[in-house]
Amino acid sequence: MSDAHSPLGKDLQNTFFDTFNDQNDLHCSAVAPSPLNNPVLVSSNALLAAELGLNPEHMTDSAMLRLMAGDLTDTDLQPIALVYSGHQFGVWAGQLGDGRAMTLGELPVVDIKTGKPQLWDIQLKGAGATPYSRFADGRAVLRSSIREYLCSEAMHSLGIATTRALCLVNSDTSVYREDVESASTVCRVARSHIRFGSFEHFHYRNQPDAVKAMADYVIARHFPQWIEDDLRYANLVTHTVTKTAKMIAQWQAEGFAHGVMNTDNMSILGDTIDYGPFGFLDVYNPDFICNHSDANGRYSFKNQPSVGLWNLNALATSFMSLLPSEALVTALKNYEPTFLQYYRQLMARKLGLEAYRDGDESLINQLLTLMEENQVDYSLFFRQLCYFSNSHRNVRDMFVDRNAFDDWAALYVQRLSQQQSSDQDRSATMLETNPKYILRNYMAQAAIEKAEQGDYSEVNLLLEVLQSPFAEHPQAEHYAGLPPDWAGAISVSCSS
Ligand code: AMP
Ligand code: MG
């Protein structure tokens, strides 16, 4: 292998391809990227590079740029695209698959917690057509890549399980959407790219052996402790149920709307995956629909918890050849209590409560109703609440109906008085819980507009800010307040 090649490529393996290459069931296809013309590095994620054991300095090498633009010259890599199917907007959509993503390989990384090597998928999104591209071009435009790059890191920094993003590359390659735009790639890093739809694919093709092979692969790679366990498939479904419930509880607590919760966009590990027309709440509005294409609001903010369960039902259905229905029902029954437990804990923590207690539900619900009625900005309220005390009711002016707020504040003050911690201690904990910075659509838009002019500074500023969203960033103070009026006019829809 030549020295001109990035060190990243040398360390990659491909257990998925090794496992399924010889199977007739075609779990994946070998693919070759179509490299971008004149690639330019928009941003590289030094923090993630270090976590992956890569030298952050190598991230800006020309060899790395070539690799990340899909040029595999002088490498031994055999990228693959995975097949999957899925339910889109509640309707069976049949075969989909990695239409614009290809996994270059898996990187072994020593886990700091366990000391054991863990494999991370290194995937290029936007590197050209695959057998699953259908009639599309396999490309990703710069604006959608910027959104995925920034949001996945923002979510990670909020403590939400998610895929990550290692770098973002722009190019001279043109792609045709409503206008001509430049093609880009994001290097997505994930513990797994297996989706609910990966199982549904083989279930609906009546290939139970392939469903089993997929489940065995996931267990061998992620849960080797279960390999000999008779309950391994039930464990896997239960694990997906509880992780998904936890993830969606976090979405609700942080005000995140995914926008396209199709079963092909749900990870078997319960990680947030496939950032498209997502949005964070500005004012608290449970009916918020972030995806312009979602006319009926199937994926509205308030519907996410129930859609999560709907999707898990679809996953459980595809395990019917491996488990009796009673076992699947038992696994699914974990969803609601797990969701509620996490959501309540998270909301209690946002309010500065040391623990959730019976009765806190009405404190939380009354607050949310007030915020909705008074059109209060969700994240800004909780950040300001960090500085609230009985003698300093700073958030009062955020409500049009001050009397109604005073009634709620009286309950809140009474609840706080039942805890030992001082106002200062509570404030310090709340500042670590309620982010000062979230990726509002207008912020992504500002970065996109500059980047489309060749100025990548805003992408890099936002990456830095969103990677420590609880900290002060004087250079980004203007992003910590209410969104500007024009933010409401931004419209985002499905794949671009
Ligand atoms: P998404 O809504 O982004 O999750 O995409 C749904 C399906 O369409 C997936 O199978 C994608 O791989 C595929 N897809 C989206 N955009 C493209 C594109 N530009 N080229 C090829 N396939 C695509
Ligand atoms: Mg998708």
Image: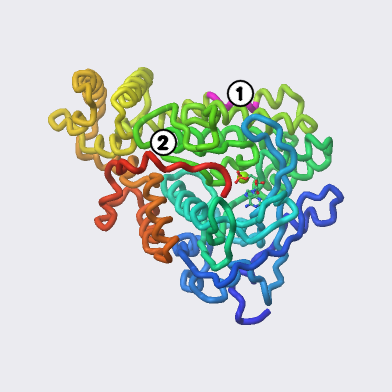
How crowded pointer 2 is (Cα within 10 Å; few <14, some 14-19, many 20+) is rated as: many
Based on the picture, tell me whether residue 333 belongs to the magenta stretch.
yes
State the residue in front, 293 or 78. Answer: 293
For badge 2, the amino acid type reads Gly
Residue 110 seen in render: no
Task: Give the amino acid type for the residue marked by disc 1 in the picture.
Answer: Lys
Image-quarter location of ligand 2:
top right
85 sits left or right of 461 in the view = right
Q: How many marks?
A: 2
Q: Nearer the viewer, mark 1 or mark 2?
A: 2
Return the residue at label 1.
333
Say which of 286 and 486 sits in front.
486
Q: Is residue 441 visible?
A: yes
Q: Name the residue located 74 percent from the left edge and 42 percent from the top edge.
A: 95
Q: SS class of the residue under badge 1?
A: loop
Q: Is residue 20 left or right of residue 181?
A: right
Residue at mark 2: 255
Q: Position of residue 494 (x, y in %)?
A: 56, 43
Q: Is residue 149 above or below residue 397?
A: below
Residue 257 lies, with reference to residue 437, above or below; the image says: above
Residue 197 percent location from the top left of the image: 69, 39
In this view, which residue lies farthest toward the left? 391
Question: Does the magenta segment cover residue 391?
Answer: no
Q: How is the image coloured?
A: rainbow
Instruction: Answer with mark 1 or mark 2, whichever residue precedes in sequence.
Output: 2
Name the residue: 62% across, 61% down.
108
Instruction: Compute the Cα span from label 1 to label 2.
Output: 25 Å
Q: Position of residue 33 (x, y in %)?
A: 68, 64
Residue appearing at x 50%, y 64% in the figure:
49
Please tell me how crowded label 1 is: few (under 14), some (14-19), or many (20+) other residues with Cα within 10 Å.
some
Numbered range of the magenta stretch? 331-336
